[in-house]
Structures are given as structure tokens and as C-alpha cells.
Amino acid sequence: MPSGTRLTLDRIACNGHGICALMAPSCITLDRWGYPVVSGEELEGKAIPEARRAARACPAKALKLC
Amino acid sequence: MSIGVSQETAFAGAGSSSEIAAVSLLRNGSTYLWDLKAHRELYGDLPDLSGDEIVTMARDAGLTGRGGAGFPTHLKLAAVLAKGGPAVVVANGSESEPASQKDKALMLHRPFLVIEGAWLVARTISASRIYLYTHNYRHIHASLQRALAQLRPPGVSIEIATGPDGYVSGESSAVVSFLNRGVALPTFTRPIDQGVGGLPTAVFNVETLAHLANIARIGSLAFRTLGSSTAPGSRLLTLSGTVFSPGTVVELLHPSPIAEVLMAAGGATDKPVAYLIGGYGGRFTPPMALLGGEPGGSLGCGLVGVIPEGACGLEEACRLFDYLASQSARQCGPCRFGLPALQGKLPAALGVRPIRRAERAVTRLSHEIAGRGGCSHPDAATAMLQSAIATFGEELDLHRNGGCSATRSQPVFKA
């Protein structure tokens, strides 16, 4: 059953703090410059609460769940 | 900066007979139409169409955006319409591609078509404000002002807005950002959702608008016959690179032999070994026979540049890439850090002492960067580079053995 929940990243607002990858390792990795790589696919299982925590923690408010 | 006096417009196209010339966008080539009466004599009056009719007309014509992305016009109109309530129209004439001239030529030669097209869109989406957005070109301002002094469509206010120079400053969200806060940088918010003054905003390339004003007169079917089944309608091209008159603007009617199209600019000065299609953020292709048969967006902003014998395509690509990297808005990490990182790998990957690993690194880095910017700038820059590697494979082999085919002292594109 798909969750319909996706993570969106405002790439312009993102400053590459990198906290999100610590909070949500199952759905966010960092590239070689420390910027998050977000797939845009539907989240499943533990990725959903992790992503929610990551979005709350983002200092740039660049991550959103929708 | 002003646009050169050598600016020419011409026709190209197999069988550009008088019947076809009678419905084409430019009608009679290079005449300046600065007088409303002369404009109406040539094109006829603008028919009174409802918003629904305009959307249907754009759909039936298969009109796509002529700014580069090739997005279907009727879908953009429908998307703004679906928002309901008041909206704003922006006629985007910024044309930030350094070698492209077609939008400037159009605003200079056919200002009324652009204004009429913007007004048709304003009618469709119930907009009461139109912005004509350009970079700071004195002649174009004069042309638009002269036209506005004669043609003030009812029910809308029209304003000319002048944005700053810069490659990404003409991107639609950057245009909206400039009109809102004076900063011409791409934003994450789509103009359709939240544009000028927070209202849904339809940003259309000026050529797209001019086509709309022409289609309103000739009908969607006649427009389709100007192109092919996969790429309906005619389109403006800028002929560049090593042609006798670089910067010549031509209306491409039907898929046409490329050599014939180039004759509008006096032909190629040297034998073409490749072409740059669609701007600095476009793609390199090996010589092909026909121009225009492919789907709408594939010609990008309509730039056709000749790469001649005696030029090293890889050097050209590197120079274009340097330019594109310098034009990053530096807002998104992958673009801000990724493009310079790629730049650093290029000499080793494509230079005279090539290392296969470096070439792979370029490909890997390109994949890491593409699709990860707020706008498509990093995607375009990396795709251009990949197309150069694909097109100039023989040159790459030559470089591996310490050679290079470059004999010219001047770069083809002065990025």
C-alpha cells in the first residue's frame, strides 16, 4: 500500500547543513559537497517518521513532506 | 549594449512559395513594422476570440514554447486558468543565450505581434497586467514604446520591464523574482502557483506570443502546415558560428536542408564538421541533412551554430562550459560546487594528455549534478558536455595520442 508521502527539497533554500542525512539515513544521503540527495519517490515504513524529523530539524526549512 | 545594425531577418524553407509566405510569422522578411497601420495591412485585424477559443486554437495548432523548453502552450494556459481569479502575463524577451538574436529581432521587427499575443493570453487568463520583459537594449525599448504608443489593448495595463544581464536571469521564475523584488535569480516557487504580486503568472517567450497572434489570423491548421507532424508550425532560428553573417535570424518553414537554411546567413564559411543546436546549454550534433523534423523542444532556443573544419569541438565545448559555470546563480549546492568541480576535471579528461579515468569522472560528476538544481542550468551545462564527448569522439582519440585538430586561432563562439 503506497503511502503517498514524498519528500520535497527546495534546492535554492538548502544550504547543505547536512543534518537531514543524520536524521533520515534511510531516505537521504549527502553528495560529495554535503548537499542532500532526495529521490522524490514515495516514502515507506520507517522512512516516513525519519523524514518528518529531518524536515522539522532543517535549519533552512528546505525540506517538506507532502 | 545594442543589437547590431547588421541584424537581418530572412526566410528559409523548402518551397517557401507565396502562399506559405502569406501565412508565415514574418510574412515578408526583413521589413520593420513600426507603424500599426502597416502592421494591420500585412497581417489583418486581430479576430475577436474568447478565452476558450484561444486555448483550443493553441491546442489544435500544437504550439509549443519557443524559449527553449518547448512546453505546450495550451497546457500552460490551462494550468493558469485552473488557478481561477486574476493573473498576470509576462512576455519574456530577455533572450539570455549569448549568441541568440531571434527574440531581439522579433521585438525590433514585429513589436505589434508580441503585444497582440500577450493581450490574447491576458484575455484568456483574465489578466489585467502585462509585463514586457527584456534586457537593457535601447533599440528594443524604442521599438516596444513606439508600438505601445499606437496600440493600447483595452482592459490591461502594459509595462516594459528591464532586467539585468546574466544567463539565468531570463529563466521564468527569475523574471518573476525580478518583477517582485528586483533580484533576477531563479526561485523554487513556480510562476504559475505564485508569480508577480503573488498572483498566478503566465510567462511566455515573445516568439510564442507572436505565433499566437499569427495563429489567431491564419488558423491552427495553416500553422501546422508550416511545420511537420512532429514539430508543428514555423520557428525562428539564429544562425551562428562560422557563417558569413552570424546573428542572422531566419524563419524555418518545414524541415529543411540545413545547407539551404544557412544560406540565409550567406552560407557556412568553412565545411561544417558539427553543429551546436539550441544555445550554449544546448547540444552538439554531427552534421545532419535536415533541420526541424524532430519534436518541438529539440531545437531549444533556435540557435544553430556551425562548427567548422579546423576547430576543435572539445575546446569549444570546454569554453562554453566555462561560461555556463561562471553563470551559475550559485544558489544550489550541486550547481555552485558541481560545475567548478567538473571544470577542474575537463583539462585532464579532454585535453592533450587524456586519462580515461578522468573521462569517466566527468560522466560520473555530470550524473551527480544533473537534475539537482533549482532550475535546469546544471542539467543543460552537463548535457552539452556529454553531447560534445559523444559528437567529438574522433577528436578525443586524437587528443589521446597527443594531437588536436585545431588550426584556427579564433574561437567559434566568443563565450
Image (cartoon, coloured by chain):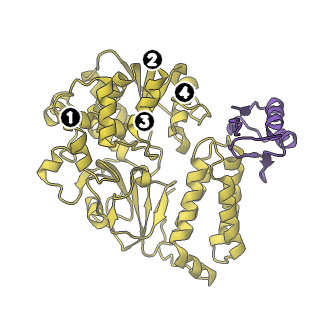
Q: Which residue is mark 4?
A: B193
Helix, strand or loop at disc 3?
helix
Q: From the viewer's perspective, is B112 left or right of A63?
A: left
Residue neighbourhood size for the residue with mark 1, other residues' Cα within 10 Å, grouped as few (<14), some (14–19), many (≥20): some
Label whose residue precedes the other's in the sequence (1 or 3): 3
Q: Are marks 2 and 1 on the same chain?
A: yes
- Residue B34 position, x and y percent, is 23, 33
Q: Residue at x 83, y 43 (%)?
A: A21
Q: Is residue B243 left or right of residue B136?
A: left
SS for dot 1 = helix
Residue at x 26%, y 64% (from the top left corner): B260
| Side of B155 where B344 appears, left or right | right
Please say if B264 is above or below B194: below
Are the residues flagged by discs 3 and 4 in contact, CB closer than 8 Å?
A: no
Q: CA distance from mark 2 to mark 1?
A: 27 Å
Residue farthest to the right, as pictured? A22
Distance from Cα at disc 1 to Cα at disc 3: 21 Å
Q: CA distance from mark 3 to mark 4?
A: 14 Å
Residue B379 is situated, as x and y percent measured from the top left of the image, at: 59, 52
- Tell me which chain the residue with mark 4 is part of: B
Q: Spot the yellow chain and give its letter.
A: B
Q: Circle 1 sits on which residue?
A: B217
Q: Give the colour chain A carries in the figure.
A: purple
Residue that label 2 marks: B86
